[in-house]
Amino acid sequence: MSWVSLASTVVAVEPAAVYNGSYKGTNDPILLRIGNGGAGQSGLIQGFPSPLADAFIDFSISKGESPFKVAWYKSDTTVTINYLQSNIVDVGITYSEIAESLAIEKGIAKSPSYYAFRDHFILVGPPSNPAKISNSSDIETIFSNLYTVAEAANTTIPVRFLSRFDKSATNIKESGLWIAIGQIKVPWATAYSTWYHQYVAFPIQALTAAILLNEYTITDRGTYLSIDSSLQSQATIFKASTDNATDPLLNPAHLLVGAKAAHPTIADKFAKWLNSGLVDLPLTIELGPPRAILKASCPKRSKIGGPDSGAEGPSLRWEYLDNRVGPDQRYTQLQSQQA
């Protein structure tokens, strides 16, 4: 697998952000390093009012730990596993069960892998919809129609698809969908495809490019709600994942604990905390504009391959709240919705 050989090329990497919870000591050590891409960009690692990093710090200190910091490293699934192998991060939130199982088998991560949460992929594209796809079709039919129309190249407005082409979970999902429709000549296997746009970038940057270029693409719901409303208005969601465990657009996330974690006790405590339901409040993230809130409680059971392997993680639920109210009122409104 390419993500194994890539690890040898990894050099010093700086975190995208460092968090210290409610404790603002500048000299507190970094005891936990988290690798993740899309959810981190959307605010799941740090956000209002109870993010993963800050909530875990505060919880740990309340249980007797000395103040410490948590660092977030921006990395897609493939790079996250590389970072675990190279001891750049201690834990990783990833989105490919096959890659996760291989990482455990090769000793890069410890067993088990923890089901953290469920996110949702969506297919977006230009409102003009030059491929004439229907949101009533299943995602395989939609991809088949996209392929046929794009290859024919006879539409007034060109049909193009943007692929992150970076071995991220989004790229893996998209590639699997192209393969699933039974096309012998997958778009990336040709010498050059005029309609298959290979754009290596992180989620927000890739989605922004697809919208500005009037291209179809696969992204996740959190990324879509993280971009400016002026960009959202230039895109149409043609297909979105449901919460059905068999939905091909469901995007389950798992937590891996690195075998080389610099502070294994803290890393293990984070995994058990995330997986035990010990978070006092739903994880909530304020995005916008327009204002959107991500709500997700932590699962109580979810070891892959263990006695609870059938358990599903919580769904990430995005809900719009009133822009006109202040943070305290928004939080009260959120709590009333949760009840």
Image (tube, grey):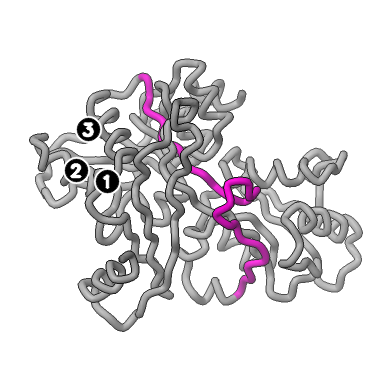
Q: Earlier in the sequence, mark 3 or mark 2?
A: 3
- Which residue matches tag 2? 57
User: Quadrant of the image for the N terminus?
Assistant: top right
Q: Amino acid at mark 3?
A: Leu
Task: Give the quadrant of residue 268.
Answer: top left
- Residue 276 numbered mark, or none: none
The residue lying at 68 percent from left, 55 percent from top is: 162
Q: Is residue 162 left or right of residue 27?
A: right
Task: Give the quadrant of residue 126.
Answer: bottom right
Number of residues whose C-alpha sits closer than 10 Å to that of mark 2, classed few (under 14), some (14–19) or many (20 or more):
many
Q: Secondary structure at mark 2?
A: helix
Magenta highlight range? 234-259
The residue lying at 46 percent from left, 45 percent from top is: 37
Marks 3 and 2 sit apart, C-alpha to C-alpha, by 10 Å
Q: Amino acid at mark 2?
A: Ile
- Which residue matches tag 3? 31
x%, y% of residue 219?
A: 58, 55
Q: Earlier in the sequence, mark 1 or mark 3?
A: 3
Q: Amino acid at mark 1?
A: Ala
- Residue 53 numbered mark, or none: 1
